[in-house]
Amino acid sequence: MHCIVLVKQVPDVANVPEEAWDREKGTLRRAMLDSVLNPLDLHALTLARRIVGDDPRARVVYLSMGPPQARETLRECLSRVPGQAILLTDRSFAGADTVATAYSLACAIRRIEHELFAGSRDYVILAGMQSVDGDTAQVPPQIAEDLGIDQIAYATDLTPGPPLVVRRIGPAGPEEVTARRHPVLITVTACTEPVYRSFRLAREALEGPISEWSAVSVGARAERIGLRGSRTQVYRLFSPTEERARSCVLVHDAAQLVALIEERYHAAPGPSAELAEAPYVLGDREPSYHGPFWVYAERGPQGVRSVSLELLGAARELAGCLGEQVAALLPCDAPGGDADELIAHGADTVYLVEHPLLRTFLPAPYTLAVAPLIREHRPQAVLFGATPLGRELAPRVAYTCDCGLTADCTRLEIGDYVKGGQTRVGILRQTRPALGGNVMATIMTKDCPTQMATVRPGVLPLPVRDPTHAGEVIHVLPDLSGAEIGVEVRPLTASSVTAPLGDAAVIVAGGRGLHSRTRFEALVSPLAAAFARRLGAHGEVAASRMAVEDGFASRDRQVGQTGQTVRPKLYVALGISGAVQHISGMQHAATIVAINKDPRARIFSYADVGLIGDLETVVPELMRSLGDATHAAH
Amino acid sequence: MRPIDVLVVGAGPAGLAAAIRVRQRLAGAAREPCVVVIDKAARSGAHNLSGALFEAACLDELLPGWSEQRSEFRDHVVPIVQDDLYYLRPTRAVHVPSRLVPRPMRHIGNVAISVSRLVEFLAQRAEGLGVEIHDGFSATSLLVEEGAVRGVRLSELGLAADGTPKDNYQPAEEVRAAVTVLADGSRGVLSTQVAEHFGRGPNPQVYGLGIKAVVQLPRDNPLGPHRAVHTVGYPHPSDVFGGGFVYSLGETSATVGLILGLDWRYGNLDPLVEFEAFRAHPFIRELLAGSVTLAAGAKTIAEGGYYALGPVHVPGALVVGDAAGFVNVEKLKGLHYAVRSGICAGDAIADAFAADDLGGSALARYPALLAERGILGDLHHARNFRQGFRWDLAVGAGLSKVGGRIPVRLGMDEDRRATRPGSRLARDGAHPVDAATFVSLSGTTHREDEPSHVLLVDPSRCAACGADHDHACTHFCPADVYRWSDDRLVVSASNCLHCMTCSVKCPQSNILWHPPEGGEGPRYKLM
């Protein structure tokens, strides 16, 4: 079985040198970063090696779309796992967003199948889940949509078989997916010990040719590539520090600390609330987009997921600026009471798309259920939750509707765009982090009737439920006869996969200041549990690198530049000095609390709330205040 | 795949000069040599650090016309027009009149450069000449067979912290070549092994530790754009050899550093503390007012000079640059010797290759060229300079005036033996040192579950070091790799800057420095 590995050369956002920061403008000079192979692509090529194994007829083909200097990245791949390298390069590709990139790569893949594999469809396409610069995870599903093949996303392991069985994290938890037809596209998360470069292969890589393919040579049509083929456009880049500045409030006792934390934790989330400009006024101008705002409603085990309700709240506000309506789209196999919930949270219309094939999520039938409706009704915007389901579905829907999609937005607002003689009125401004979170980008959609965006759960506030709000329910019977289902999915029990810190809303981290493993375990874990109980959230224990090296905690708990990066709602740093290497792993937490006995500790410059004191006395006091029965969790 | 004729270990100024020279000499010949350069850094220049004031004439020799063509490197070369020496007292700076400054220490006519930029430039030129450069490969040992160097062994890859192989384990690869050029820098692991196999010079090699930072300055700063400042005196005591420097690197950029001879006697001397004290001196602080630190790092310098030179030609290998010890401490320069010794090696190799005699004795031409072209002569003149300072600044200064005329070799002891039991430096903690930030400004990274590349020969020896030497490593390492905690030495190898101080200075001879996997360590770009 052959493998095509999609690789990308990206800026090394993990190692940003100090001189790359333009202090005056507050931005990052991207040109001053080294170029490296996208880290997740390393895992993709490690898995490719596992698939081709020792079969001399199986080929590995690396495909990258980029400028001529991307040859270096292809050589690097060849110096790890030998194969053939193709650089898809052409000036006309410049400025391509994910839609145009996916189309271009799909054309190249078709040529690879035809020319290099002699028409054989027995191959697998592997790619890292996302690139560190764009970070959207949109290109692979859009390629899959173009090629009409299945995508297995978030793969954590695979056995080549045959049959090829992939372990992955699905919308409902860990799953085992068997690919029943090929080709199939697999996107991988960090899941392997990546294969190293070998000196011998590095020398061979210098000798071997790298094929350069142009747009014409892969049959790519000019109107679908580059700037012309793009459906989104970045129109502003700015520094994340514009989003917020921290000044530490020092408290003097545990009870005060708990009160402040609770207040911040339960307050309306998101900087968008504080930083909103004056409300948008359309007046009697003609807006650039027309039609309602739609929200894709996702079902979870307990009914509609709260992210969909959060999106309804946002849609109401956005639609309100333009005098438009709000609708919700709910694919299901049988309606429940969900339509009422959606209406109570702001939907004027609910489209219930019913079909037995929609019982559990699979991208092919869901795309077929949703896309035709969008094409028919032409809403001016469709919002999806950036959940595992949303991240698989939204790109495919956007691609097939030929519309622009911006993923993981942290802010959505209506505004005007005036630049270089071009004016657009009442567009949806979509803001998201890029370059590994080092920069913020505001993006707009172009050249299509529908603006699409995904937003992560917890970013937008939950709207107030209004049972008196009236709405219409429309039943839709989709035509899913074209849906080819090429995978078999088997849910797994959760035990085998651990991603503890990433999902935790509350993290309590201990540093060197705990002094010993026994103290660490005696103070940090119970405090984490107490906070979690009090705030009604999922809580976890983390540690600084020093604490891990001293043996207080295991490495999978490490937060920092060389550990995990986390964005919980609450991060409590106990006995952590605040070295820059640690800060980079948790600086985007919504609320940062620091407890340290050294008043000069750097952590206090990054914290929202601080308490100077000895952990031996402070932690037990905190436990008492947190356990206070008069303030039980909601 | 072409067999390798010349393997250069270390893509620094010396190694790249040698590689360039070989390809230049034999360009267009019937048979062109296959020249391969390897370096443990992730990219060329990332492990190179120096002050630096450079005698650029050697580049005219290697790459004629280089200054007429535009390059990143040339754009950042700063001619030095003003050169001052100061004697620092705790709060004052006493200017030393230029007529009293010894000639070798005058720098007008030199240029201030960044050696990492120089290396990037040389690497580009080398690749243009057909040199294969492979960054990110660590060589851990020489392959010596039948008394001759046949190549090198690269590091094993993919071991877990406990030494067990992980899924991606890759055994050590061997790289063989007809001739190996060792250009692995000050206290280079392989060039040190040459001494073990083939003998060393009459004096042991001794080292200094240079700690520096590159800073951004506001416009119209007091330093000025073409200036070199050297200092002696404060902050370190007069029995510690060394001094500070500040060099302009342009209108809004400068480099500031402190070099200390590693033969200091104090168990608790912390070079980072001394560096911060130096930066905090009112005179320096004023020169650098409004500065923002962009990068920082540290590296040792071989200071032993002429009498510490070991064999530079052994069967199958040549040693060039800092790895050989071609540093003139009197002039405070080594870079141009690095380039020039690389040219000598390149010439000797090219002649041997043309005569089809790479494996034979034709390479003995190399040491002869070093003598003919004045490198050895320069070092001979400064041969007793450093030794005078093992006692005191005043003694050294005095001896330095006559050192060139003393007919005997002044001896030198190994740096580690200079640390005296119970000797401590009193410091009041007035200059807090943020080691974590210093390390992050070097950009150093290592895979954290890699086995520590810094090995303790016998951990039980560390306990005794407390009373005698105050666990010296916990003080002398500029990267805070060593910590004494809970009665044991905790090693944070991932902080390591590859400066080599620990392998030189551990009073117990208990630390073995060993290259980690390739592609790790600092990421110097402006240094």
Image (spheres, coloured by chain):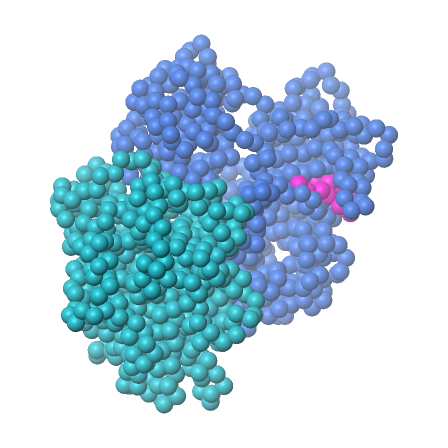
Chain colours: A blue, B cyan
Q: Between residues B512 and B156, which one lies in front from this camera angle?
A: B512
Residue B19 part of the magenta-drawn span: no
Question: At 32% from the left edge and 76% from the top edge, which residue is drawn?
Answer: B374
The magenta-colored residue range is A442-455
- Quadrant containing the C terminus of chain B is bottom left
Position of B485 relative to B508 (above/below): above
In percent of width and height, residue A140 lies at 61, 51
Q: Between residues B311 and B51, which one lies in front from this camera angle?
A: B51
Please indicate, yes or no, whether residue A14 appears anywhere in the rendered image.
Answer: no
- Image quarter for residue A501? top left
Q: Between residues B290 and B49, which one lies in front from this camera angle?
A: B290
Position of B206 relative to B223 (above/below): below
Position of A31 relative to B274 (above/below): below
Residue A450 part of the magenta-drawn span: yes
Number of numbered tags placed on the structure image: 0
- Quadrant containing the N terminus of chain B is bottom left
Q: Between residues B117 and A296, which one lies in front from this camera angle?
A: B117
In percent of width and height, residue B502 lies at 25, 53
Q: Please tell me whether the stretch drawn in magenta is mainly helix, strand or loop.
A: strand
Question: At 47% from the left edge and 87% from the top edge, which residue is drawn?
Answer: B29
Question: At 46% from the left edge and 36% from the top edge, which residue is drawn?
Answer: A586
Question: At 61% from the left edge and 60% from the top edge, which residue is drawn?
Answer: A66
For residue A331, side relative to residue A43 (left or right): right
Position of B179 relative to A246 (above/below): below
